[in-house]
Image (cartoon, rainbow, N blue to C red):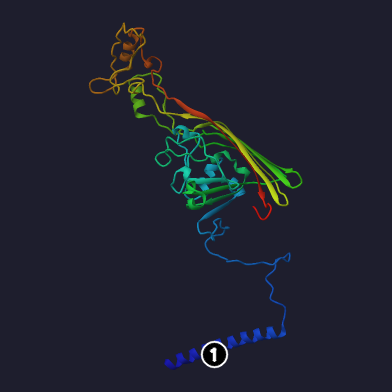
Amino acid sequence: MRSIARHRLAVAVAAMLAASTTTSTAFAQSVDDEPAAPQPASTADGEPTVLDTVSVLGSRTKPRTEASSAVPIDILDGEKFHQQPSVDVLDKMRTLVPSFNVSTIPIDDAATLVRPATLRGLPPDNTLVLVNGKRRHRAAVITFLGHGLSDGSQGPDISVLPSMALEQVEVLRDGAAAQYGSDAIAGVINFSLKQLDHGGAVEAFAGEYYEGDGITEQYSAQVGLPLTARGFATLTAEWRSADPTSRSVQRDDAAAVAAAGYPGVADPVQVWGSPQTHEDMKFVANFGIPGEHVDFYGFGNYAKRDVEGSFYYRNPTDRAGVFSNDGGNTLLIGDLDATNAVTCPTVALRDADGNLLPYAGVAAAVAALPAECFTHLTAFTGGFTPRFGGRMEDHSLVLGFKGMWGEGWY
């Protein structure tokens, strides 16, 4: 066995030496004869092809993450970004960017108008938002009902940008406060706008949920225009409207009020679903004129949005300060006569066991009240649910020059 092993080893060594000798001989021959230098592979049009590191495992698509960076950077192509089925830029970002979250909370105070978006589980104002590399201003809304994470934050509103206007979206998913400042603790998002000097596009979109609600219409248009012989002006506009949705069930307390005979109790009294968007108009302009040494650039936007949604139900038996001030045991009654000539009687709402009294008895006691005694129950027998909404406007304009001045000033 040992002799056979030695024989095999000797054969292998001999083969390796022979290969080495052959390679050395070929190299020496090429040097002596001085042939043409080896040429890289060429494409069909004659251009040389330079191969970088090639990986054939794990994916059939072009990677979107910049691997050579020390931190993860997602680079999203504008066309693929726009082709996402969502109509809002925030929802497209939520689909495409890891650790980017945004939600539509039905009853969320002013956050219904400007939805707080979070990156890497940090508040909205911890993410730096850039447009064409320039800082984006913050929205006018300070989140009040932020569900813990976003409470008190004031982040930019990126939903005012139409997706058709975007050439590329870059997302740095790591802290960059040392380079950009304290508003980049969560990361940086840069929206690059298209630079077209010709052509255009028009799109129309419509859809609804399987329940038959939430009908949404969206119309978009874009045009590229020449600005002098070298420049460009790209104009993009978008208009959208969306009906509300409802995925609600009747509240238990409202069902108890209706069972006690109180009229005018809606079913459901409180709507949980997407708010209604009466109009959502967006306009973005990007323009520039390249020069030999100095370039002029500018971009801006104007957007307005009118949103209306539901709010919390005001129970006609126990709503403090409106219908009762003692937990629902008695009805809150106000004396309209400042002279206190009449003492308003007490009207009970519950029995000794805490059960609601039938509305018929309560209504009779209310009807017997003196004229100067007032209660909201006469106007809202089934309680009421306020509507919450608002109108938002957002606009900006950035102008500047960049290039080389004098002795290398940039």
Q: Residue furthest top?
A: 341
Q: Secondary structure at mark 1?
A: helix
Q: Nearer the viewer, residue 293 or 342?
A: 293
- In the image, residue 239 sits, relative to residue 22, either above or below, namely above
Point 45% across, 90% down: residue: 5
Q: Nearer the viewer, residue 112 or 287?
A: 287
Q: Quadrant of residue 217?
A: top right
Q: What is the count of numbered marks?
A: 1
Point 72% across, 85% down: residue: 33
Q: Residue furthest front?
A: 407
Point 33% across, 9% down: residue: 369
Give the residue at mark 1.
14
Q: Residue furthest right?
A: 229
- In the image, residue 18 sits, relative to residue 82, either above or below, namely below
- Residue 55 location (% of width, % of height): 55, 65
- Residue 332 location (% of width, % of height): 32, 17
Q: Amino acid at mark 1?
A: Ala
Label 1: few (<14), some or many (≥20) within 10 Å?
Answer: few
Point 52% across, 62% down: residue: 58
- Residue 85 location (% of width, % of height): 56, 43
- Residue 297 location (% of width, % of height): 66, 45
Q: Nearer the viewer, residue 337 or 262?
A: 337
Assign the N terminus to one quadrant of the image. Answer: bottom left
